[in-house]
Each structure stands twice: as structure tokens, then as C-alpha cells.
């Protein structure tokens, strides 16, 4: 970042503010998509004859309006009182803060989900812009940065969905797989040592996806297909993350951080009896947290570790 008083610093800071506001708006969009996806999933489950629990049935009744209208003429409504929301209710973060996190019409609490998801996307956008290691100048480099921002929105949707409902929807994973492949190809084409880069990518894929695929097939074979320790969604997500990381050390760091964070939550949770025995912790959000740390600060961490070892 530039220093204050220099005209370039002013442009810089204005751009940072623009990116942060864009992040808030996109976060608001992401939050809306999470609910819409959930509504569609419950509806499809029900129509395909799957038995919904009482809680899920109530949820479907509440979210049903989200599935009934075409996207274009869809006005957001309060999920409690169904009141149509005005423009001033849809300003990311500000609306939430101005009403103390309650619906302006029925006064029911809206919850922390909306502001958190808006803040998360805004933070990821801003950090990406500040730490972006390549110049953002011509058409190609701007497109690549915009593709990355798009993937961030999809990653946050996955994070929220898995944290809430223990599922990584394919409809979000597939576009990420496409963007991740484009990313990997562009960077491989520019790699000084193509064989080395490809090898590193392949080892990364084994670390983040192959190991879990093996575990998945082993456990479903052991339990004769009934249930397994890891979900196949994690296998697919790991594959996507390895494509973006393109480095086996960063892939290993992602897995390490994910498991470390998992134990930080599970051990005190079990000791303090906040988590019930045998409780599941969704692995997707942990993997994603590890991925963001590796993507933004991984190289620093690896360099620091190497220095420590020497
Ligand atoms: Zn309301």
C-alpha cells in the first residue's frame, strides 16, 4: 500500500473502497443464493420422494416462495412476515445495522447470517486486491482477477451452505472446477519449469483430493455403502482447491490448517460439552479456511517454516 499524501495512494485507497463495497453487494447476493439453493434442494428432495424431517418441512414452507418465481421478477421478502423489502432494506450491512439486526416491519431478528456473509465477501475481495501478486492492467489480467473474485463468491456460498446443512452443492462445485481449470492452464503455460509445475499440481491433487477419495471408497466399502466418514463433496472440493493452489506444499498446508482448525473446534467443544458426543463438524468450511490462508499467506508460512528447520 502507498503512503498518504501521494496522489497514487489516493487512487489506491479509492480502489480499495470500491472493491470493498463491491464485496458487500456481492456478499448480499451470495447470501440470497444460499437460501434459494436450500429452498430448491428441499423441494427437489421432497419431489423425489425423500422423507424430510419435521424441521426441514417447516423450513420448506418458509423458503417455498423463493422457488416459485422466475429470477427476474423476484423481489426479496422478509422470511418471517413475507413483507416485500424496499430498497432501503436491501443496502448491505447498513440496513442490518440501522435496524439492530431486525426486520423493519415485524421486528423479528434477521440473524447474523446476512451481515457475516456480506462482511466475509467484502474482506476476501479487499485482501485479494491488496495482496494480488500480478499486475491488474490489461484485458487478460483484469479478466483473471474478475474470475478470481467470482470464485470467491462461489467459495463463500459453499462455506455457508456446508456450515449450515453439511452439503457442498454440485451446482456451485462445477463452475468452480471450470474456473480452477482455466486458472491452472494459464499458470502452467507461463511456468518456467512446466514439468516441475505439473508434478507439483499432481501431488497437490493427491494430497487434497486423492487421499480423501481413497478414504471415501474404503469407508463406503467397509459400511457397504450406508454412510462414510468423509463426504464425496469434500473430495470434489479438494480437487478444485488443488487446481487453484497449483503447488503441493500449499496443498499440504491447506490440509494441515483445516485439520488444525478442526481440532481447535472439536477438542474444547467436546471438553466443555458444547458439542454433543459424535457430533459432526462439516469439513468443507475448514478446508476453505485452510485454502484462503494458504492462498494469501502460504508462501510466507512455508518460508518461515523452512528457515526454522535450517
Ligand atoms: Zn419481517
Image (cartoon, helix red, strand yellow):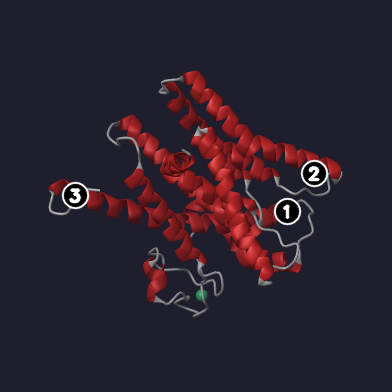
- On the image, the x and y values in percent for residue 164 come to 62, 60
99 with respect to 258 (left or right): left
- Residue lying furthest front: 310
Query: Where is mark 2, residue-wise?
Result: 219
Q: Residue at x 65, y 61 (%)?
A: 266
- On the image, the x and y values in percent for residue 85 come to 45, 68
Query: Where is mark 3, residue-wise?
Result: 9
- On the image, the x and y values in percent for residue 200 come to 53, 28
Along the line of sight, the residue nearer the viewer: 202 or 20? 202
Q: Nearer the viewer, mark 1 or mark 2?
A: 2
- Judging from the image, what secondary structure is the residue with disc 2 in? helix
Whether residue 68 is situated above or below residue 168 in the rendered picture: below
Q: Residue at x 49, y 80 (%)?
A: 107
Please rate how many residues cluster around mark 2, counting C-alpha atoms within 10 Å: few if below 14, some from 14 to 19, many from 20: some
Please rate how many residues cluster around mark 3, counting C-alpha atoms within 10 Å: few if below 14, some from 14 to 19, many from 20: some
Whether residue 40 is situated above or below residue 107 in the rendered picture: above
169 with respect to 144 (left or right): right
The Cα atoms of the two marked residues, 3 and 1, are separated by 52 Å
Please rate how many residues cluster around mark 1, counting C-alpha atoms within 10 Å: few if below 14, some from 14 to 19, many from 20: few
274 with respect to 140 (left or right): right
Along the line of sight, the residue nearer the viewer: 59 or 164? 164
The Cα atoms of the two marked residues, 1 and 2, are separated by 25 Å
Query: Where is mark 1, residue-wise?
Result: 45
- Judging from the image, what secondary structure is the residue with disc 1 in? helix
Amino acid at each position: 500500500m502507498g503512503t498518504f499524501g501521494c496522489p497514487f495512494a489516493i487512487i489506491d485507497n479509492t480502489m480499495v473502497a470500491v472493491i470493498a463495497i463491491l464485496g458487500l453487494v456481492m456478499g448480499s447476493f451470495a447470501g440470497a443464493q444460499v437460501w434459494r439453493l436450500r429452498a430448491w434442494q428441499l423441494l427437489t428432495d421432497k419431489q423425489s420422494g425423500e422423507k424430510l424431517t419435521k424441521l426441514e418441512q417447516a423450513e420448506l414452507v418458509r423458503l417455498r416462495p423463493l422457488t416459485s418465481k422466475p429470477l427476474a421478477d423476484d423481489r426479496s421478502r422478509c422470511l418471517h412476515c413475507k413483507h416485500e423489502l424496499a430498497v432501503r432494506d436491501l443496502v448491505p450491512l447498513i440496513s442490518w445495522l440501522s435496524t439492530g439486526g431486525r426486520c423493519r416491519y415485524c421486528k423479528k431478528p434477521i440473524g447474523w447470517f446476512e451481515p457475516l456473509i456480506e462482511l466475509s465477501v467484502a474482506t476476501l475481495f479487499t485482501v485479494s486486491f491488496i495482496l494480488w501478486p500480478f499486475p491488474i492492467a490489461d484485458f487478460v489480467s483484469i479478466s483473471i482477477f474478475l474470475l478470481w473474485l467470482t470464485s470467491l463468491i462461489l467459495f463463500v456460498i459453499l462455506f455457508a451452505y456446508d456450515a449450515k446443512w453439511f452439503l457442498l452443492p454440485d451446482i456451485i462445485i462445477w463452475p468452480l472446477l471450470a474456473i480452477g481449470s482455466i486458472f491452472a492452464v494459464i499458470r502452467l503455460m507461463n511456468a518456467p519449469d512446466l514439468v516441475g509445475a505439473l508434478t507439483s499440481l499432481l501431488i497437490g491433487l493427491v494430497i487434497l483430493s486423492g487421499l480423501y477419495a481413497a478414504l471415501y471408497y474404503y469407508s463406503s466399502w467397509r459400511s457397504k455403502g450406508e454412510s462414510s466418514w468423509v463426504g464425496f463433496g469434500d473430495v470434489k472440493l479438494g480437487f478444485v482447491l488443488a487446481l487453484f493452489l497449483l503447488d503441493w506444499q500449499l496443498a499440504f498446508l491447506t490440509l494441515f490448517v483445516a485439520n488444525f482448525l478442526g481440532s481447535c473446534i472439536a477438542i474444547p467443544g467436546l471438553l466443555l460439552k458444547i458439542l454433543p458426543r459424535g457430533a459432526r463438524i462439516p469439513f468443507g468450511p475448514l478446508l476453505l479456511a485452510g485454502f484462503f490462508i494458504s492462498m494469501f499467506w502460504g508462501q510466507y508460512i512455508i518460508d518461515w517454516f523452512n528457515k526454522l528447520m535450517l
